[in-house]
Amino acid sequence: MPVDPCKKFACEIQRCLVENNFQEVRCERVFESMRLCCIKFKPQSLVCSGYDLEPRQFAPDTEKLDKSK
């Protein structure tokens, strides 16, 4: 079975989210890398089967909001 060309980005997303307390905005670069990979390899990539190819909109960093109080 061939290696999924976008699997490494899916793993990077998970790692980034865990390291950043699931603040998606802090992983924006990784999400964009995954999106670009899926645009290129969606037919060959199983991890892209449910991935939205539209650019993501991120909520603000809630930890930064909490600290500003």
Image (cartoon, grey):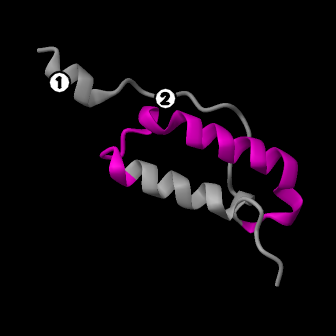
- Residue type at tag 2: Phe
How many numbered discs, if any? 2
x and y percentages locating residue 69 in the rendered image: 11, 15
- Residue 3 in which image quadrant: bottom right
Q: Is residue 52 visible?
A: no
| Image point (88%, 60%), residue name | 43
Decide whether the magenta segment is chiefly helix, strand or loop: helix
Identify the residue position indicated by label 1 in the image.
66
Give the answer, above or below, for where 43 lies relative to 29: below
Q: Secondary structure at mark 2?
A: loop
In-front residue for pair 68/49: 68
- Residue 2 in which image quadrant: bottom right
Which disc is residue 58 wearing?
A: 2
Magenta region, residue range: 18-46
Residue at the outermost bottom position? 1
In-front residue for pair 6/50: 6
Q: Is residue 53 visible?
A: yes
